[in-house]
Image (tube, rainbow, N blue to C red):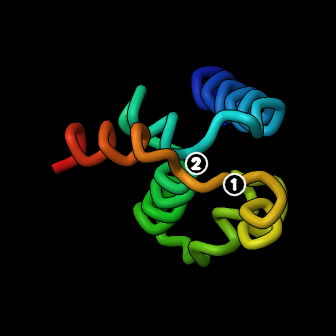
Amino acid sequence: MDRQTEIEAAVFRRLLQHLDERKDVQNIDLMNLAGFCRNCLSKWYVAAAEERGLEIDYEAARERVYGEPYAEWKAKYQKEATPEQLKKFSETHK
């Protein structure tokens, strides 16, 4: 692995750590503010693997991003979206 790839991998691991430390930040908040969320990262993970000829299951990618099976994370940390969050989402993601 070259140095740039090594650095990028470290940054990705740090991003996952940061998101793990901020479970209070809901995916809809990320979508509304940044246009991506943990699920997007999981999809990008699968796509990057496929581009390199590897097959990674979406649920396995989610577990990598969430740090545990998605269903468990969702049950523990995901809150119901507020009407305000849903309104902003619908306005910005048509």
Q: Quadrant of the N terminus?
A: top right
Q: Is residue 21 above or below residue 23?
A: above
* Observer-nearest of 86 and 51: 86
* One can see residue 56 in this view: no
**Which residue is rendered at x = 60% and y = 55% of the image?**
80
**Which residue is rendered at x = 50% and y = 35% of the image?**
30
* Observer-nearest of 27 and 82: 82
- Which label number is shown at residue 94? none
Q: Residues within 10 Å of mark 2 (few under 14, many from 20)?
A: some
**Which residue is rendered at x = 80% and y = 33% of the image?**
17
- Which label number is shown at residue 78? 1
Q: Quadrant of residue 2?
A: top right
Q: Which residue is mark 2?
A: 38
Report the side of 4 relative to 19 (left or right): left
Residue 11, horizontal then vertical, whole percent:
67, 25
Marks 2 and 1 sit apart, C-alpha to C-alpha, by 12 Å
Q: Of the residues shown, which amino acid type is indicated by label 1?
A: Gln
**Helix, strand, or loop for circle 2?**
helix
Report the side of 7 relative to 40 (left or right): right
* Observer-nearest of 59 and 6: 59
Q: Residues within 10 Å of mark 1 (few under 14, many from 20)?
A: some
Q: Earlier in the sequence, mark 2 or mark 1?
A: 2
Give the farthest residue toward the left: 94
Residue 56, horizontal then vertical, whole percent:
60, 73
Q: How many marks?
A: 2
Residue 70, horizontal then vertical, whole percent:
72, 67
Q: Is residue 89 above or below residue 56?
A: above
Residue 4, horizontal then vertical, whole percent:
58, 22
Q: Is residue 1 above or below residue 68?
A: above
